[in-house]
Image: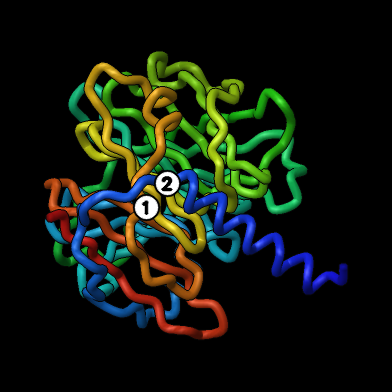
Amino acid sequence: MNLLNKVIVFSFLFLQFHIAFTQTSKPLFKSQVALGEISDKKLNELSGIISAKQSSCFWVHNDSGDEARIYLIDKKCRLLCTYELESVAVKDCEDIARVIINGNSFLILADIGDNKAERENIKLHIFPEPTYQQEDTLIHIPKKTIRTVTLRYKNGPRDAEALFVDPVDHQLYVISKRDFQSTVYSASIFNNVKKNFSLLTPVQTLPFTFTTSANISPTGSAILIKNLTQIFYWTRNRTESIEQVLSRKPTLIPYQIEPQGEAITFGLNGEGFYTISERPFGLKSSLYFFEKL
């Protein structure tokens, strides 16, 4: 069997496997709607997104082609302000998340990309969520406000592009990308503010691969995981652990594939969720909204 035939057969089996794994139900979200198109050249390789506490705005970041910085955009994809992390060097930032500590919102810039699975350690940079002022265009986040946590996989290096923090118990979850079945890893780093190193322990295997982003709702009642071609959705009872939730069949959300869709986030007010894409080969990238029914 030549390489092309192998790819075709693998793709067919992979698709059938995904169909068997997911459950069908009545629609949970409306079809995706483009809210705005990325036009600023600084935003060419968007790899992470999270809803900002600033109304109708989002924090986004690029991956390995950029420095340690995040950007604030509005729903029309207009760049409002750039925020640079002072004295922080990054290799490949692949996702962004939020954790609430003592009632305060912190952002997590996740330097976890590792295409060749050769990084002994990966890093998270945690800092207070900035408050945007209308006249701001470039802000430096002081080094003294940034907490850097080093992580190491218990079973060796992995490439990953997705993470989230459970708002119920503050447990961190990172999801591998290139394993034949994406693996969910966990670590406890937010119950001790002085803890700056932790092992990532595998806790769950998912029956799909190439995970590119994940997010949990602000209340912890729902989880989204996406890869390049699909979006998986789970609801969660308050008494369930993340491992219990992800062991169930998810709902497959209808999704019109983006050029290189690597970012997903819930809205902060339960309105639905959003996705955004890189711009490979200069293709168009839009902010899409999936309104909850």
Q: Secondary structure at mark 2?
A: loop
Furthest residue in direction right, as rendered: 1
Picture quarter containing residue 39? bottom left
- Say which residue appears at 45% left-offset and 50% top-offset: 213
Along the horizontal axis of the image, is 129 left or right of 2? left
Q: Nearer the viewer, residue 58 or 117?
A: 117
Residue at label 1? 252
Along the horizontal axis of the image, is 209 left or right of 242? right
Residue at label 2? 22
- CB within 8 Å, label 1 to label 2: yes
Q: How many marks?
A: 2
Task: Indicate whether 284 appears above or below 193.
Answer: below
Q: How is the image coloured?
A: rainbow
Amino acid type of the residue tagged 1 in the rendering: Leu
Q: Secondary structure at mark 1?
A: strand
Number of other residues with Cα within 10 Å of mark 2, as a class: few under 14, some 14 to 19, many 20 or more: some
Q: CA distance from mark 1 to mark 2?
A: 6 Å
Q: Nearer the viewer, residue 179 or 155?
A: 179
Where's the C terminus, which quadrant? Answer: bottom left
Q: Nearer the viewer, residue 45 or 275?
A: 275
Viewer can see residue 74: no
- Say which residue appears at 53% left-offset and 33% top-offset: 184
Task: Indicate whether 61 appears above or below 116.
Answer: below
Q: Nearer the viewer, residue 250 or 79?
A: 250
Pinpoint residue 77: horizontal percent, then vertical percent: 27, 73
Pinpoint residue 252: horizontal percent, then vertical percent: 37, 52
Where's the N terminus, which quadrant? Answer: bottom right
- Say which residue appears at 38% left-offset and 15% top-offset: 191
Amino acid type of the residue tagged 2 in the rendering: Thr
* Numbered circle sitting on residue 213: none
Pinpoint residue 174: horizontal percent, then vertical percent: 51, 36
